[in-house]
Image (cartoon, rainbow, N blue to C red):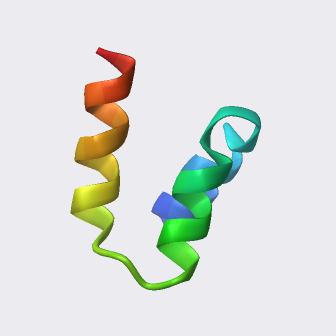
Amino acid sequence: MIVLQYFSNYSDKLTKFETRIVSGDNIIEVVHDWCRREL
């Protein structure tokens, strides 16, 4: 999964988001949550 590979590149800061992706949460929700934190 390309998105998972992208997140794995930043695993040092996105460990929680990777876990949510693997556990089957909505990827869009994860990305939006990450964007809000970054911005």
Residue found at x 23% / y 44%:
32
Task: Indicate the quadrant where residue 33 lies.
Answer: top left
Residue found at x 53% / y 83%:
23
The furthest residue to the top: 39
Q: Is 20 on the left or on the right of 32, as rendered?
A: right
Q: Is residue 24 above or below residue 28?
A: below
Q: Is residue 9 visible?
A: yes
Q: Is residue 1 visible?
A: no
Q: Residue 11: where, in percent of width, then height?
A: 72, 44
Residue found at x 38% / y 20%:
38
Task: Indicate the quadrant where residue 25 lies.
Answer: bottom left
Q: Is 26 on the left or on the right of 1, as rendered?
A: left
Q: Residue 4: where, in percent of width, then height?
A: 56, 63
- Relative depth, front residue between 9 and 31: 31
Q: Is residue 28 above or below residue 9?
A: below
The furthest residue to the right: 12
Q: Residue 30: where, in percent of width, then height?
A: 34, 56
Q: Quadrant of the C terminus?
A: top left
The furthest residue to the bottom: 24
Number of numbered discs visible in the structure rendering? 0
- Relative depth, front residue between 26 and 1: 26
Q: Residue 15: where, in percent of width, then height?
A: 67, 50
Residue found at x 28% / y 73%:
26
